[in-house]
Image (spheres, rainbow, N blue to C red):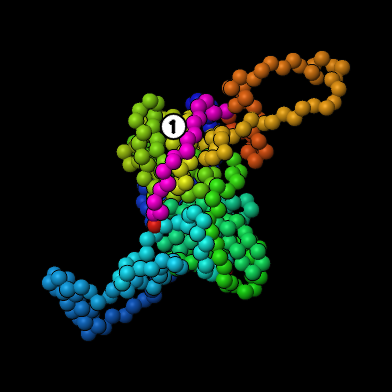
Amino acid sequence: MTDGSVSEESTGDPGPAPDGSVGRPGPGRRRARGGGRRRWLAAGGVAALATVLGLSLALRSGAAPACAAAPAGLAAPAGVALAAGQMPLAAPPIGGAVHKGKATFYDSKGAGGNCSYPSAPANRLYVALGPTEYSAGAACGGYLDVTGPRGTVRVLIMDQCPECAPGHVDLSREAFARIADPVQGIVGVSYRAAVDPALSGPLTFRIKEGASQYWFAALVAEHGNPLRAVEVRQGSGAWRTAARQDYNYWLIDSGAGPGPYAVRVTDVYGHRVTATGVTMSPGRVQRSTVKMYGGSAPAARTAPSTRPPSPRPSATPSRTPASPSAVASAAPPAPQDGTGPPALAASSASDVSRPVDCAARS
């Protein structure tokens, strides 16, 4: 930590390998089932080869393949009409749209899922989405309000369910128990994105193991809404746009320098903030004092005292008006761990333009 705007906390990285390989399912998430041993007969192999050659010749001659239907599991979400052969756009649930479908449950065994979080949330209320709604990591860090027979529960999107079609949400066991009897195993539900959910604290950043001044990779958390963009710069240099990976790290393949960095984060609803003092400290969670919305993390509030002054002079020191830096140095609010240092610089802005929607249970 160089300028004191973030604090660091050691943590393991259950996510992808440091070599930047992508597409690897996160820990606690079951992989899609593969096929068993296959025995191929000579005649079957010849027939398959003939089919491939025939299809290739047909495509070369301009003929359209006969398989125009979308694969199973990628049906259009409710209310969306697709033309013949059109695939549904991958997009996380956002806005006020209500989706109807079904819910099952599973257990991540404490792991942070495909979104590469160091661990599951403390309240164990989380959800895995199918590939379409997981949207290559674009849904990570957002929240859903899921309603079932017993009520509604708010869950963190932290995982991918490879076999889940659009409309199928795979809840944690604890979340499922809030909305239905677990004995049922599967229930009909409705769900919608939670817009600007209450934040438990300021943004956090985790530089990936293996990162250096020549290869930048960071995990951003505690942002409430799904993110649209992450930009990084060192000193007064130009902003560089990081590329989101499907395991939820933001990468700059050519690196961003040795740091420290300013990181500008924008969510899908236009909230934009900048945190400074992020250092090249792989494997450590660095807690800023900048909230994604609602202003920077406030200093601790002091309620007016109703007690008479103490007769001891040492118990009633004189107070002077606090400077901005002194206010930022005050103790953090209750949701934080009390170790976060003051932010030396932070800014926030609201982006008036709205983004276009991008797009097993035990």
Let me know if residue 350 is in the magenta part. Answer: yes
**What stretch of residues is rendered in magenta?**
342-358
Residue 279: % across, % down: 46, 32
**Which residue is depicted at the point 44% across and 36% down?**
264
Residue 152: % across, % down: 63, 61
Let me know if residue 333 is in the magenta part. Answer: no
Residue lying furthest left: 61
The number of numbered badges drawn on the structure is 1
**Which residue is depicted at the point 65% across and 41% down?**
335
Location of residue 332 by image quarter:
top right
Decide if residue 55 is in sight here: yes
Left or right: where does residue 332 sit relative to residue 273?
right
Residue lying furthest front: 352
**Which residue is depicted at the point 51% across and 64% down?**
99
Secondary structure mainly formed by the magenta segment: loop
Decide if residue 113 is in sight here: no
| Up/down of 185 relative to 283, above or below | below
The residue singled out by tag 1 in the image is 262
**Which residue is depicted at the point 19% across and 75% down?**
55
- Label 1: which secondary element: strand
